[in-house]
Amino acid sequence: MRSLFRRSPGEPKTEEQQQLDQAVSKTRESSFRRISTLFHEAIVTDETWEELEDLLVQADVGPVTAARLVEDARGEVETLEERTAVEAETAIRGQMVDVLGSDSRVPLEKMPSGTVLLMVGVNGSGKTTTTAKIARYLERHGRTVLLAAADTFRAAAIDQLRVWGERVKAPVVAHQQEADPGAVVFDAVRAALARHVDFVIVDTAGRLHTKFNLMEELQKIRRVVGKANPEAAIIALLVIDATTGQNAILQAKSFLATVEVDGIILAKLDGTAKGGVAFSVYNELKVPIWYVGTGETMDDFAAFDHLEFVNALFD
Ligand SMILES: Nc1nc2c(ncn2[C@@H]2O[C@H](COP(=O)(O)OP(=O)(O)OP(=O)(O)O)[C@@H](O)[C@H]2O)c(=O)[nH]1
Ligand SMILES: [Mg+2]
């Protein structure tokens, strides 16, 4: 039998746990509050499981993932002699942790010097803000960062990155509007090498339907990185917007059909009661969530700890 994952009383929460708690408060106060009350009953009936599935769908877990979670939790409880609500809650919480996939990502701050992070994602998903948050996060872990303004589509995008660069005190390599993003990245990677900067974070336009062909553009960026620094490791991070719920999954699917992605950043988790979408990310996309955006400032960024996420939704 699994443990109930509850922290012992009085054990203080870390800063990241508090951030996650805060970020999921809207989701917790809506559907998950009602899910918790389901388990206040002494026994579980067919109706309990049905209601659980409905509530998960309401939390934007997505019908496929909600059905899988309930089926697996129910199967687990049915093997037990005692089938009380306590066992049911333990089972569903355990299945929720499992459905998030393995928790074995390499933290960004442990990645080798020379790593290039490519930020991709649909319009407005949070790429530029997340670029700044990652810069801040890495600098707090003692690593150095340079930002590359490869979203050359709008002049405002370049200015936005410059402003963030000043705030997080990271140098920004930028060219003119409409310049070749590959040329920006080449200069940025060369500059990082020359200045012994650990990471280059590339803010891309990430648009799917423009005069640029996204796939070609990203492939070109990869080639250019290889030319500028043959040792560089490229990590592509897909930023998705939690406030769009299941739509984020649909958009991510079309993205993943085009570009190779290593990890997902679930931005704007704080702004939504649809935080259940996190559970369908791995189940439907087979790419794990690595980090979450928990607000609009540069410090509103946290590692995605599976157990803590589930705890934060329930407790
Ligand atoms: N509440 C909240 N807002 C966020 C978060 N991340 C980004 N935002 C907001 O989302 C909006 C869009 O963010 P950007 O970083 O500009 O998104 P983008 O993907 O770079 O947008 P384009 O360059 O236009 O494609 C901004 O208003 C951000 O402040 C987050 O974690 N929480
Ligand atoms: Mg942007």
Image: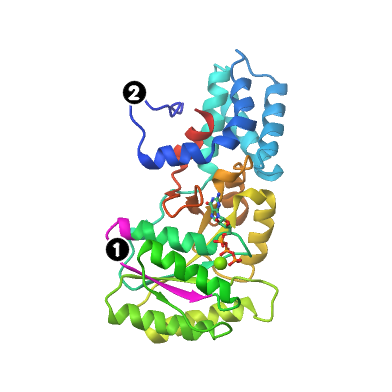
Say whether residue 260 is visible: yes
In this view, the residue farthest toward the top is 42
Q: Residue 143 shows which numbered tag?
A: 1
Q: Give ligand 2's quarter of the image.
A: bottom right
Near-viewer residue (42 or 153): 153
Q: Which residues are magenta?
A: 139-150
> 10 Å neighbourhood of mark 1: few (<14), some, or many (≥20)?
some
Q: Quadrant of residue 29?
A: top right
Q: Amino acid at mark 2?
A: Gly
Residue at 69%, 81% (x, y): give it: 211
Category of crowding for the residue at label 2, using alpha-carbon neighbours closer than 10 angstroms: few (below 14), some (14–19), many (at least 20): few
Q: Which residue is pictured at 55% across the width and 25% down the height? A: 89
- Which residue is rendered at x = 64% and y = 34% of the image? 70
* Distance Cα–Cα, label 2 vs label 1: 34 Å
Magenta stretch encompasses residue 145 = yes
Residue 110 x/y as whole percent: 31, 60
On the image, the x and y values in percent for residue 183 come to 48, 86
Q: Which residue in the structure is indicated by mark 2?
A: 10
Check the image and report above or below for 2 versus 132: above
* Tag 2 and tag 1, C-beta contact below 8 Å: no
